[in-house]
């Protein structure tokens, strides 16, 4: 299998959540508060796709799926796509572009502060996802894109602080994120150890 | 906006089973009539006709499928899914504390002692959404007076059922169970304060707090405790469940107030379920002319 073969399938899969939200809206199946359902649905899928994107490198290392990194850029752009839909539905459907209200929301409500911050940090990553940008930024490209770890933490916090009492669901996201971080740390430690032994074969950092 | 629909029954009539059944039919027709002509006459019936002339009763489907009732699940849709677990017969309510005639009453006996009426009230959730609900039930004050509260009774504490079998949400310590709420005595005795036993002329569905719940229309919805089993007259201000959970977010009073921002939700506007654009939230949920005097001289930003 190659990334080229899998890409169209993943592309369609990543559009399914949006399609299902749109279909439910059309069929009036979003319940009593459709706006809330849209904001919640796009937010859920932003976070899920973000964790899937962060799982690419661990999956390649642990399962040997060598095609996985070839999907990373597309997955990352989908994260930004859903995050933007999420933000737009908040700005439009929830606030109707009442900028004063939005300003106070960002200032006064920590879960909105971190949410907006997450999107602001995510956007430059989306903008520098082209091959040309990678070439132009050189070593700095990798540095810039390490922001994704911070963004993921902000994303989970955003969900955690939104929840009133039952943190089971955000806890699951946090646990998955912690596992993905742990795998990276373990990988980093092993690489250092093998580098110490004088191995000339340095695995690529991801 | 009180719509009284007093059935033409005396206390003696109510004890009769057939009359009891007639009352339901009457209420059902009353509900249909009232909802059918809502829109226009709601404002006309309202004591404050300037408040929201376009209050239309929220469809029953929405009222019964979009609920905050953590005892039956934490999502909005889970209470209606778990409704069958909450068995509400037999049901008894204990009234105790600072009163001369404490006692426990069977729910059926409570109903027999009350002339049911219909009230269409706005319900404003602290989360920024609202509904208009045609309740049936009785004023809390007429029920409480029978227990003869003493001068020591400064507050009324309410408690929901504690039974993890009937309330599966209680199997996990999400909140400290049982759900507890409280009102100041004058709030509890205010004529707007209501005990609902029905909705749209039918028995109250489990997800809406069957068999009986509190309705305090000028306060955020979480004050209107569901499935009550105990009411106590107390001297000290009770600690309500959400205040216990997050005192910086939820206070004792929880009066609807667009000028007091909540850490999670600006309270300036609300989305009426079924409407797209938000509307401005009214001070005391539009009942200010009837209840504002309860809070004269109080700093409502501090006593949120």
Image (cartoon, helix red, strand yellow):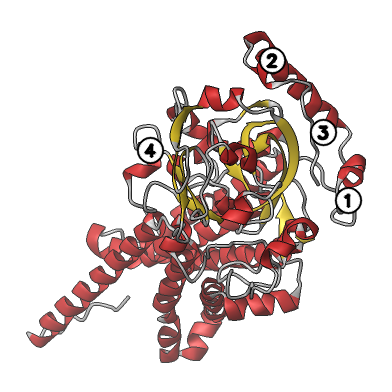
Q: In the displayed structure, would residue B155 be above or below residue A190?
A: above
Taking depth in this image into account, of A1 and B258 the one nearest to the observer is: B258
Measured as percent of width and height from the top left, residue B291 is found at 73, 58
In the rendered structure, the residue with mark 2 lies on which chain? B
Taking depth in this image into account, of A121 and A67 the one nearest to the observer is: A121
Which residue sits furthest top?
B18
Same chain shared by disc 4 and disc 3: yes
N-term-proximal mark, 1 vs 3: 3
N-term-proximal mark, 2 vs 3: 2
Q: Is residue B7 left or right of residue A195?
A: right
* Numbered label attached to residue B150: none
SS at badge 2: helix
SS at badge 4: helix
Say which quarter of the image contains residue B162. Answer: top left
Give the residue drawn at x 60%, y 81%: A107
* Numbered label attached to residue B168: 4
Give the residue drawn at x 37%, y 53%: B176
N-term-proximal mark, 4 vs 1: 1
Measured as percent of width and height from the top left, residue A153 is found at 40, 73
Q: CA distance from mark 1 to mark 3?
A: 14 Å
* Numbered label attached to residue B35: 3
Q: Tell me if mark 4 has few (under 14), some (14-19) or many (20+) residues whose alpha carbon lies within 10 angstroms of its own.
A: some
Q: Tell me if mark 3 has few (under 14), some (14-19) or many (20+) residues whose alpha carbon lies within 10 angstroms of its own.
A: many
Q: CA distance from mark 4 to mark 3?
A: 34 Å
Q: Is mark 2 in CB contact (under 8 Å) with mark 3?
A: no
One can see residue A169 in this view:
yes
Q: Which residue is mark 2?
A: B13
Taking depth in this image into account, of B77 and A116 the one nearest to the observer is: B77
Say which quarter of the image contains residue A77. Answer: bottom right
């Amino acid at each position: 299998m190659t990334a080229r073969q899998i890409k169209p399938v993943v592309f369609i899969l990543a559009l399914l959540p949006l399609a299902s939200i749109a279909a439910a809206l059309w069929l009036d199946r979003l319940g009593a508060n459709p706006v809330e359902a849209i904001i919640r649905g796009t937010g859920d899928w932003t976070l899920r796709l973000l964790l899937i994107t962060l799982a690419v490198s661990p999956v390649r290392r642990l399962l040997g799926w060598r095609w996985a990194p070839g999907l990373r850029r597309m997955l990352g752009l989908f994260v930004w796509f859903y995050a933007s839909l999420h933000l737009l539905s908040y700005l439009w459907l929830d606030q109707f572009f009442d900028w004063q209200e939005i300003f106070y929301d960002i200032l006064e409500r920590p879960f909105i502060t971190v949410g907006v911050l997450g999107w602001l940090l995510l956007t430059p990553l989306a903008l520098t996802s082209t091959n040309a940008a990678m070439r132009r930024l050189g070593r700095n490209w990798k540095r810039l894109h390490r922001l994704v770890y911070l963004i993921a933490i902000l994303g989970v916090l955003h969900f955690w602080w939104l929840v009133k009492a039952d943190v089971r669901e955000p806890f699951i996201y946090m646990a998955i994120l912690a596992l993905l971080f742990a795998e990276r740390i373990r990988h980093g430690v092993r690489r250092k150890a093998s580098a110490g032994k004088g191995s000339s074969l340095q695995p690529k950092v991801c | 906006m009180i719509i009284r629909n007093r059935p033409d029954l005396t206390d003696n009539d109510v004890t009769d089973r057939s009359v009891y059944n007639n009352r339901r039919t009457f209420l059902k027709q009353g509900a249909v009539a009232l909802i059918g002509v809502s829109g226009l006459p709601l404002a006309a019936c309202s004591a404050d006709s300037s408040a929201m002339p376009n209050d239309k009763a929220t469809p029953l489907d929405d009222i019964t499928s979009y609920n905050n009732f953590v005892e039956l699940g934490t999502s909005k849709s889970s209470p209606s899914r778990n409704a069958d677990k909450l068995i509400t017969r037999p049901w008894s309510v204990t009234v105790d504390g600072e009163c001369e005639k404490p006692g426990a009453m069977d729910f059926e006996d409570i109903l027999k002692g009350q002339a049911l009426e219909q009230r269409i009230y706005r319900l404003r959730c602290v989360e920024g959404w609202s509904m208009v609900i045609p309740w049936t039930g009785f004023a809390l004050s007429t029920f409480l007076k029978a227990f003869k509260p003493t001068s020591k009774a400064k507050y009324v504490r309410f408690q929901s059922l504690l039974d993890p079998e009937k309330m599966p949400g209680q199997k996990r310590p999400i909140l400290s169970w049982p759900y507890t709420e409280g009102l100041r005595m004058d709030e509890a005795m205010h004529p707007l304060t209501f005990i609902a036993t029905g909705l749209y002329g039918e028995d109250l569905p489990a997800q809406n707090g069957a068999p009986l719940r509190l309705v305090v229309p000028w306060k955020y919805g979480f004050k209107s405790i569901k499935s009550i089993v105990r009411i106590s007259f107390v001297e000290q201000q009770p600690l309500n469940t959400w205040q216990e959970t997050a005192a910086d977010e939820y206070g004792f009073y929880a009066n609807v107030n667009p000028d007091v921002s909540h850490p999670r939700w600006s309270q300036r506007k609300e989305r009426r379920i079924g409407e797209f654009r938000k509307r401005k939230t009214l001070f005391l949920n539009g009942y200010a002319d009837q209840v504002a005097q309860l809070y004269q001289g109080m700093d409502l930003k501090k006593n949120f």
